[in-house]
Image (tube, grey):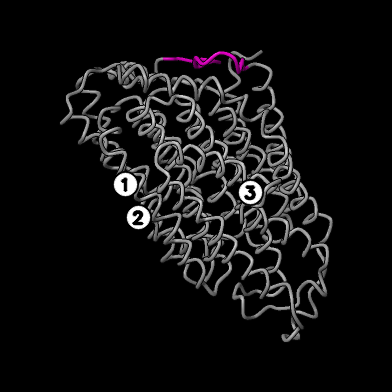
Amino acid sequence: MFNHLLSLLIWLPIVGAIPVLLAGSGRRGLARWISLLVAVLAFVASLFLLTGYNPADSAMQLVESHVWIASLGVHYGLAVDGISVALILLTSFVTILVIVGAWEVIQDKPHQYMAAMLVLEGLMIGVFCATDALLFYVFFEAMLIPMFILIGIWGGPRRVYATLKFFIYTFLGSIFMLIGLIYLYLKAGTFDLHTLAALPLTMKEQTWLFFAFLIAFAVKVPMVPVHTWLPDAHVEAPTGGSVVLAAVMLKIGGYGFLRFSLPIVPDASEHFGWLIIVLSLIAVVYIGYVALVQEDMKKLVAYSSVAHMGFVTLGIFIAFMLVRDTNNLDAAKLGMQGAMVQMISHGFVSGAMFSCIGVMYDRMHTRLIKDYGGVINVMPWFGFFYVFFAMANSGLPGTSGFVGEFMVVLASFAANPWIALFAAFTLIIGAAYTLWMVKRVLWGDITNPHVREMKEINGRETFVLAAFALAVLALGIWPQPLIHLMDASVSQLVQQLAVHKI
């Protein structure tokens, strides 16, 4: 029953978008229910990965391979490891909450909105499954189309500017990756990632390829200094677009480093790892200060995402330093595990934060912090969720926001205490900008009469926020199932670094 499970996960939401579109704007209720049914079926199908995947085996599993373009040796190749499984589950989980969250909010062409969201889900899952570099690139680029549509049609007043900036940044970055893949194909005669990883490359070749991949994936993470498209995209995107963008799409940059930079160009990744570490620390510290002065809630959380994703790249590349300088494989494994846990945790926390902002925006039609104040007086249940997610965003122990960052800090300390000091500083600055926002939005007297008219969250909104809260709490209290799911895959990656060093 698992022979074509990955194809089902990819194409079920994409094909399911067709009846949603056919339902048309005249039958909005039907379009919404079909989209929810498709999203739920995709999530249920993703749960079968937990049955079909053996977490004790580090090999790529549930393999599918079919000739796609015979003349070029291109295959429709799919497979997953523990990291892929975790990210697929995150994607299918978040998609359900996004569709439920947009149920009453999206009144203009809801069938097109829901269809775009389903297509985006299938393409993102395709990225996490692809074992052929060209297939990966196709999914990687195709994701831009539904997100471009989501921001461009249902976005804010400056949506055209935001969509063009988002598209230009990500598309130009991807061109460098395509050039690198073409070069590798001419050398190997195939786009198979396993074959490309075994290809002997000189240091000069690896250097050029490393920077080609770096530009593509750094834009997606995004890393400093190519992060400026993200705040604009978040501010103008509809709530669902912001949730998917932060919760899933940003993770594709970190995933790309694991699938391309680490196995294909290990020498260059080790040699230039210091650059990634420095850029990651800048993201953690400097971008935190940038978030502190933001007046728009969405922009603040967007900059927060850049800072938190800095832990992902830091955890990945600190492993290179640990293997190279100290041969401390346990600490290297801890750092990479922390990066993976941080990816999943940030998906929950950032998705929840943007959902909370969306709840307030639906009532007040403003995201400016100064327009609020005293919200807790009229929306106590909402205030409970908002404070909880703010604590998770600050890295409070007991929430998922603490686990991954703490693991990366521990690994960084084993490599260099100064790196750990800068990384741990995020616990202070993160609490500063997050709690400063919460204080001004939730507490104090009501000075804006429109705030007094705000209604408490309804059942639909409670379901979305409660689902995010349970995920954040479960991962914060008991991260072991997630760590176990990815353990063999992470161990294999670290072992590759150690073998390569020898």
Image height of 407 relative to 170, above or below = above
Q: Quadrant of residue 430 in the image?
A: bottom right
Which secondary structure lies at badge 2? loop
- Marks 1/2 in contact by CB < 8 Å: the verdict is yes
Q: Earlier in the sequence, mark 3 or mark 1?
A: 3
* Residue 173, disc: 1
Which secondary structure lies at badge 3? helix
**Relative to residue 333, is residue 11 drawn left or right?**
right
- Residue matched to label 3: 114
Task: Classify mark 3: residues with Cα within 10 Å, few (<14), some (14-19) or many (20+).
Answer: many
Residue drawn at (81%, 69%) of the image: 379
Image height of 280 relative to 55, above or below = below
Q: Name the amino acid, label 3.
A: Met
Q: Nearer the viewer, residue 158 or 265?
A: 265
* Residue 226, disc: 2
* Residue 257, percent from left and from top: 39, 35
